[in-house]
Amino acid sequence: MKLYARLLKFIKPYYSQIIGGTICTALVTSTTLLIAPLVGYIFQLIEDKNMFLLNLSALGMIGLFVLKGLFQYGQEYLSYFVAQRIIVDLRNQVYEHLQDLSLDFYAKWNTGELVSRVMNDIQTLQATLFTGFVTLIPHSLLLLGLMGYIFWLNWQLSLLTLVALPLIVQVIRIFAKEIREISEGVQQKAADITSHLQETISQVKTVKSFAMEKEELAKFKGKTEKSFDISMRAVQILATQNPVIALLQTIAVVGIVWFGGREIISGSLSLPQLISFATALGIMTDPGNTLSKAYSIIQQGMASTKRIFEVLDVKPSIADLPGAKKLPRINGEINFENISFAYENEEVLQNINLKVKPGEIIALVGRTGAGKSTLTSLLLRFYDPTSGRILVDGQDIKTAKLESLRKQIAVVPQEIALFSGTIKDNIAYGRPNASEAEIIEAAKFANIHDFINSLPKKYETQVAERGSRLSGGERQRVAIARAILRDPRILILDEATSSLDAETESLIRDALERLMKGRTTFIIAHRLYAVEHANRIVVIDNKQILEIGSHQELLQKDGLYKYLYAIQFNNKA
């Protein structure tokens, strides 16, 4: 019941449409209820040989179906509108919630699983809502109305009809429980397939370079076969349910015909009345069967709803604290005070103390996994330190609004992820309202303008998903232009010049040097020649700061930096 209650809040904004749909539903039910007595009346007129009223009744029957069709259109249109709007609202809320969730959530959840819940599960819920509005409510009302009518005609026959009803309801409940449990498994297998598909498509170069197409296909087939097996279990249940219900209904109908025939022979019931009764039962058969199927669909939807709310129930570990204030335009002074950080009980940083002056260039150096990127992630407040605090211009970043902090920081990573769209859109990603002149100026600053102008569509060139139509160096220069346009006070360069040819690296280093001027900058690098001109080099090892100094100062010490430098340049500095 909790799931139904939570869905109600998405329904509330559309009460007016629901009321309109309910009125149409009531009118559809009313016109449908008139069919059975009208059929009986027509047969009575045939017995009485009343041609005039017979003709009028025939026309009345046609008019009744026309009215029913009009009301049914209104009912289905409004019901589908509400169902669609709820799905749009829910999908938007899930996406908004995903944007608010912290990075630790994404480290634990599989991307394909999330995509499946946002798309597949919500799509299943849409079918459920439509079934609920268009099928469950009107057909339930129709069944109740028809039950009242047949009791009015002949209560003995009606009681005979009800003998099968408890059995049918119990059968539906038994099957529905099985269907709901299996539906959760079906959705999970669909998520596994989505995850595998997304992973192999995004890493198609790796798959092909290792000639692993056959192996990946075998894995994919294995997942689809498992999905097929569990789906067929659901089909078996559904295929068994319908014949069982139909058999119970047939037994009830045969009993009614037998008992009705006896009543006619004894004179307690007329033939037109039995025909009206049989017509009502015939009409009841469709909503009865539909409701049994609808109940199964609703159980599938509830399984999907549970999976959707599991995502919505996750609380972000990083969020604005109560009373958080907007961070004003900063100078760029940063102070790491006794910072320690552990991820899933594994300590990554320990007692880090570092004060950075505005405009200072700090290089973070160390072995792989030393915690260099973690330190800048803490500055961006992707995570909070286990102990200690980070001050920006003297203000604890925990007390600042996240957006106001991150808008003053720009990151140029090693692996540039561009978005589908134009080059212009990607440069302006951090400032969507930037003018064309500002975008071009940023591109010139990043040494990418001439290349863009050489393209047929220039700045309107589509970069494709993840910027796959551009080379690595071109993507990095677009990222630098994006950072320039953002005009950050703090800059983070994470291996921004690695894996590039000499000419491209020269263009990028020139752009980065101009970008760093007047900005507090953190350079994360394994290639040590990239950090030689930093004001200070911070060497991190074994979770702590091991050394701090300029390039020349550290080379004069017999420490880790000198050791790493010697290994890279194959000399003893």
Image (cartoon, rainbow, N blue to C red):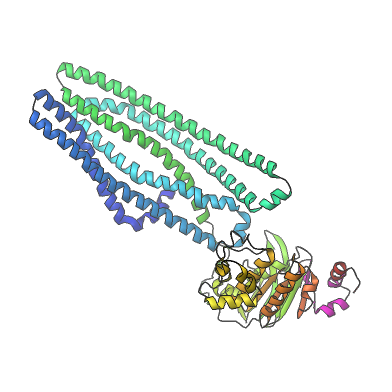
Which residue is at a point 52% across and 33% down the rendered structure image? 233
The furthest residue to the right:
572
Residue 328's spot in the image, x, y percent? 55, 81
Which residue is at a point 38% across and 46% down the rendered structure image? 130
The boundaries of the magenta stretch are 539-563
Residue 414 visible here: no
Residue 534's spot in the image, x, y percent? 76, 78
Residue 562: name its quadrant. Answer: bottom right
Which residue is at a point 70% across and 52% down the rendered structure image? 206
Residue 311 versus residue 437 in the image, above or below = above
Residue 541: name its quadrant. Answer: bottom right
Residue 518: name its quadrant. Answer: bottom right
Residue 470 versus residue 436 in the image, above or below = above
Which residue is at a point 21% across and 31% down the rendered structure image? 151
Closer-to-camera residue (283/460): 460
Closer-to-camera residue (493/371): 493
Closer-to-camera residue (305/476): 476
